[in-house]
Image: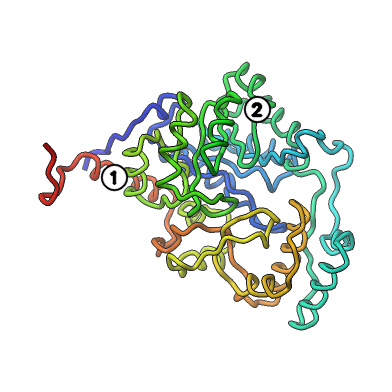
Amino acid sequence: MAKRTLRTPLCDLLDIEYPILSAGMGPSLIGEKTGAPVELVVAVSEAGGLGVLGGAGYTVEEMRDAIREIRKLTGRPFGVDVLLPAATVAAGDAPADSTHEIPLADALNALPAAHREWFEKIKAEFGLPDTEAVISTGTTTSRPHAAAEVCIEEGVPLFCAGLGSPEFMVEAAHATGMKVLGIAGNAKNAGRIARGGADLVVAQGHEAGGHTGRVGSMALWPQAIDAAAPTPVLAAGGIGDGRGLAAALAVGCIGVWVGTRFLASKEGGALDIQKQAIVNAGDEDTRRTTIYTGKTSRATYNRFHDLWEESGLEPLRFPVQVLLASAVVDMFNRAGNVDYVGPFAGQVAGMIDEIKPAAQIVEEMVEEAADILTRRLPSSVTVS
């Protein structure tokens, strides 16, 4: 069968074949592989979409190396996603010479007494081994200005702000021809990102995995389109196949930003047990919680959520809460107690029942969406 054609203005803007971007997922926790590694980026871009590197888990120089590795493996456009915490952007980067690695166990000594006591209590009650994870003090999240500069220096086609506003670097990016994307969870922020000069806005609904907001996708997408106009909008949240892609295009979005479906791919950077958790999940098996980062995020339900809720503790500010959560999950993982381990994932997990190559996911999404958008209305529907 002939290869299907599915083009929108996004394809022309980014010089890609299909209006599908893989989300730039970073690691769920310290010590894990990145959610969107080089392999996934290359696979999606080679399939005709646009792969986005999850830059949050890298140091600035490691991210530079990853960008160069992508360029060795594909000549197609790609993107890089960096988290831009507002306080860090405003205060400025951590010094470049302060970059070093320390054991996560040592970093926990800086936690408030109540959180440290709870950590020790959990460790003792379950007989958990020590955490062996290592934390870097020089990640892109702590050095967002330097991370943006590296993306500009390396000629990355698309810079993606997975958290926060990219406004501070838009002018410099545009001067080199780079396109800029920002992610919003409500219409107000969609408008703010557009007014800040971004070329694209992703409107991410409540259903999405990772950091996500309070507004459902089908309510958010059209409101974000109105708020961001004339800046074009991509849809995210609840998209895992061609039906979701077709729905997003029908609403007026020019493409989609897809996370969980690509996380659960052969090239996705999640651990095997995390991928299996997505496959096993039903539509009600995710939870929106502050447990992992201190900010609201969605992950597959596991018993760690119950432990946290029973603690009565308030979440620590981002990214300090990440230290606590990472240590607990790392210990449970080392103990082989997978009931307390689960990945960031959206509600779309309920429709994922197989780990597939990323290229196959792109192909099937395009085929299904094209079929929906070109076939006749069912006989039960009449239009006059």
Mark 1 and mark 2: Cα distance apart in space:
36 Å
Looking at the image, which residue is at 79% across and 54% down?
135
Q: Position of residue 194 (x, y in %)?
A: 55, 28
Q: Is residue 66 visible?
A: yes
- State the residue in front, 70 or 185: 185
Q: Give the quarter of the figure containing the N terminus.
A: top left
- Identify the residue at horizontal 63%, vertical 49% (top origin): 26
**Amino acid type, mark 1:** Glu
Three-letter code for the amino acid on which mark 2 is drawn: Glu
Image height of 149 relative to 273, above or below: above
Does dot 1 land on a helix, a strand or a loop? helix
Between residues 119 and 277, which one lies in front from this camera angle?
Answer: 119
Residue 327 or residue 335, whichever sits in front:
327
- The reply to whether discs 1 and 2 touch (Cβ–Cβ < 8 Å) is no
> How many residues crowd mark 2 within 10 Å: few (<14), some (14–19), many (20+)?
some
* Numbered label attached to residue 167: 2
Q: Tell me if residue 286 comes above or below residue 318 in the rendering.
A: below
Question: Which mark, by number, is residue 367?
Answer: 1
Q: Is residue 193 positioned above or below 327 on the image? A: above
Q: Position of residue 347 (x, y in %)?
A: 46, 59
The residue that appears at 73% across and 42% down in the rendered structure is 141
Give the foreground label among 1 and 2: 2
Q: Position of residue 125 (x, y in %)?
A: 77, 83
Q: Position of residue 223 (x, y in %)?
A: 44, 37
